[in-house]
Image (cartoon, grey):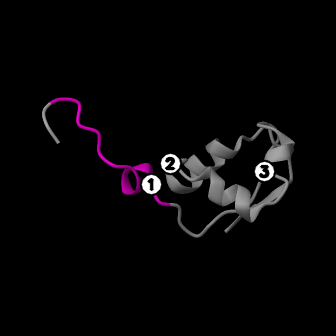
Amino acid sequence: MIVRTRQGDMLDDLLYEAFGHHSDIAAVLDLNPGLAARGPLLPAGLELRLPDTVPSARDVAEPVRLWGRP
């Protein structure tokens, strides 16, 4: 998937718009070499490749038990 940035877009916001979460920014950085060096605010008109799917944090993370034994 290709998305075009608007002035001031942030990568985590773009991921949230596309997938409903922003759990795998590393995958997007791997697909877009040099993107991390641009800083947090992206310029307008930048074409970014996004993975077809990004696993949600719920799919990746171990559940946390606040009380009781595991």
| Residue pictured at 47% horizontal, 60% vertical | 55
Q: Which residue is mark 2?
A: 21
Q: For the residue labelled by badge 3, is the local secondary structure a helix, a strand or a loop?
A: loop
25 and 1: which one is in front? Answer: 25
Kindly give the residue lying farthest to the left in the view shown: 68
Q: Quadrant of residue 46?
A: bottom right
- In the displayed structure, does residue 10 sit left or right of residue 33? left
The region drawn magenta spans 55-67
Q: Amino acid at mark 2?
A: His
Residue contact between numbered discs 3 and 2, judged by CB atoms under 8 Å: no
Q: Dots 3 and 1: beta carbons under 8 Å?
A: no
The spot of residue 52 in percent (x, y) is 58, 70
Q: Can you tell which quarter of the image residue 32 is in?
A: bottom right
Q: Which mark is residue 56?
A: 1
Residue 47 x/y as whole percent? 81, 60
Q: Amino acid at mark 1?
A: Ser
Residue ID at (63%, 43%): 12
Residue assigned mark 3: 5
Q: Which mark is residue 9?
A: none
Q: Nearer the viewer, mark 3 or mark 1?
A: 1
Residue occupying the far front of the picture: 69
